[in-house]
């Protein structure tokens, strides 16, 4: 199933078909047919959790290694997204604002692109959007390493909030109101 999901991520030209069936809150994937919404109501799925964050290392858009463990002592938002994901694009301005507002207080935002495009294409998109936070390239399997259901749907955006002690304290799947998410982040600071 993971190989099929990876194939789907590479078929960005089919995105309008997928987005039309998934609703505005999330962009889920399953199989090669248009996916059913992960949540029939289209609402964001979010939960307070308490589990260790994985010790993952990614490569940024220039190829430099970025380790999540290096951010221990900071509050980290790890957002799995893609350039073609409309709900992801909707949330980007909020992440830009959060980084500006709370970066000095120890907030680090890491955007994990699941695009199959080359990093240079993601970098161009990021420049157009004015993204001011750390961007790395990732894979679908990385989402599962955060404690998700390995056989479940991958929903974009999927975002994890890691506290200063290196523990995941909140997760969300789908688009969330910026003010609501800011309050969640602020409570972790």
Image: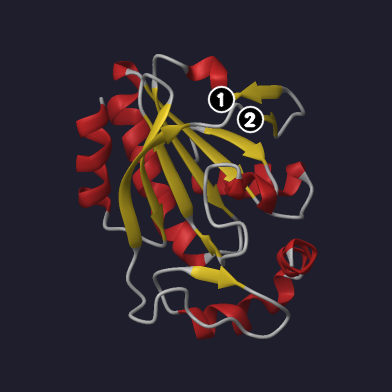
Q: How is the image coloured?
A: secondary structure
Would you place residue 37 above or below residue 123 in this image? Answer: below
The residue drawn where x is 33% and y is 56% is 46
Report x, y in % for residue 169. 34, 37
Q: Secondary structure at mark 1?
A: helix
The residue drawn where x is 35% and y is 27% is 163
- Checking the image for residue 91, the label placed there is none
- Checking the image for residue 56, the label placed there is 2
Report x, y in % for residue 13. 73, 75
Q: Nearer the viewer, residue 180 or 152?
A: 152
Q: Quadrant of the C terminus?
A: top left
Mark 2 or mark 1, which is nearer the start of the sequence?
2
C-alpha separation, residue under disc 1 versus residue under disc 2 = 6 Å
Residue 19 occupies quadrant: bottom right
In the image, 143: left or right of 32?
Answer: left
- Mark 1 is surrounded, within 10 Å at the Cα level, by few (under 14), some (14 to 19) or many (20 or more) other residues, namely some
Report x, y in % for residue 182. 25, 42
Answer whether labels 1 and 2 touch (C-beta < 8 Å). Answer: yes
The residue drawn where x is 48% and y is 58% is 89
The residue drawn where x is 79% and y is 47% is 118
Would you place residue 42 above or below residue 147 in this image? Answer: below
Q: Secondary structure at mark 2?
A: loop
Report the number of discs.
2
Report x, y in % for residue 42. 36, 76
Residue 84 occupies quadrant: bottom right
- Checking the image for residue 68, the label placed there is 1
- Mark 2 is surrounded, within 10 Å at the Cα level, by few (under 14), some (14 to 19) or many (20 or more) other residues, namely few
Q: Quadrant of the N terminus?
A: bottom right
């Amino acid at each position: 199933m993971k190989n099929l999901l990876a194939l789907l991520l590479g078929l960005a030209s089919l995105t309008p078909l997928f987005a039309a069936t998934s609703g505005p809150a999330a962009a889920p994937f399953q199989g090669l047919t248009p996916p059913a919404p992960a949540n029939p109501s289209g609402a964001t799925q979010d939960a307070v959790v308490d589990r260790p964050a994985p010790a993952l290392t990614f490569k940024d858009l220039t190829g430099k290694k970025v380790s999540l463990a290096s951010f221990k002592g900071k509050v980290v938002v790890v957002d799995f997204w893609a350039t073609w994901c409309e709900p992801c694009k909707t949330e980007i301005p909020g992440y830009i604002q959060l980084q500006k507002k709370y970066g000095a207080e120890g907030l680090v935002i890491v955007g994990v692109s699941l695009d199959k495009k080359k990093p240079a294409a993601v970098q161009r998109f990021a420049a157009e959007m004015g993204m001011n936070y750390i961007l790395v390239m990732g894979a679908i399997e990385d989402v599962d390493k955060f404690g998700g259901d390995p056989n479940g749907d991958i929903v974009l955006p999927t975002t994890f909030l890691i506290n200063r002690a290196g523990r995941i304290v909140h997760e969300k799947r789908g688009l969330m109101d910026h003010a609501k998410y800011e309050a969640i982040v602020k409570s972790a600071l």
